[in-house]
Amino acid sequence: MNIRPAQIRFYIDADILGFGQLIASLRNDITYPGDPGAEIHKRERPPCPITSADVLDTEWIPEVARRGWLIVTRDSKIIENRREITAVREYDAKMAALNRADASTKWGQLEVFMTQWRRIDALASQPGPFIWRVSRTVMTQIPPELDP
């Protein structure tokens, strides 16, 4: 059997860890904090370099951004989280924040993610920095002028 390395493209944040574990069991290009790695579809995904869900944003955001991965998180108040916005801008990170109202459960997170999948997937190949808020019906970019 010929197993090749997987190309990680998405990092699921610790605030939706259960969703990350679920979706990473289906795709070899998705990882999450504490991911031990896996073989999926004849691709070997390595363990995630973020080894714990307890790692601070200021530590994992630069690491994920350096690797060019799209961050998927759930933070409907991202616009008020100046530290996180600053880190995304400073490290040229790419982020899609699932709307908390639509994504309050694993099922809701899956619904939002899959409903907007093609648009989220397209974001992974775009250069950062950017932050998009994602709901079932719309995706809205947080404008750069909201920098702190």
Image: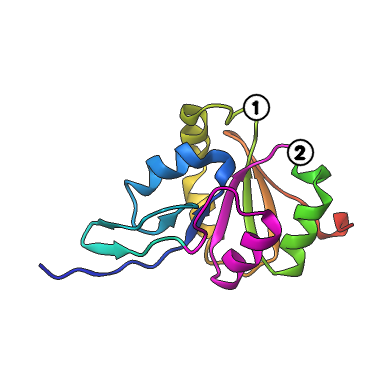
Residue at the (58%, 55%) spot, across then down? 71
Tell me which colouring the rendered structure shows: rainbow
Residue 46 point in image, percent of width and height: 36, 64
Q: Counting residues from the N terminus, which is met first, the one under dot 2 or under dot 1?
A: 2
Q: Which residues are magenta?
A: 49-77
Judge from the rendering whether residue 141 lies leftward or rightward of residue 70; answer left or right: right
Secondary structure beneath label 1: loop
Residue beneath disc 2: 77
Element carrying mark 2: loop
Q: Residue type at mark 1?
A: Ala
Within 10 Å of disc 2 (Cα), the crowding (few <14, some 14-19, many 20+) is: few
- The verdict on residue 72 being magenta is yes
Q: In which quadrant will I find the C terminus?
A: bottom right
Kindly identify the amino acid type of the residue bearing the numbered disc 2.
Answer: Lys
Q: Is residue 83 above or below residue 109?
A: below
Nearest the viewer among 20 and 94 is 20
Quickly name the residue at label 1: 101
The residue sitting at 38% across, 68% down in the picture is 7
- Can residue 35 be seen? yes
- Residue 114 seen in the figure: no
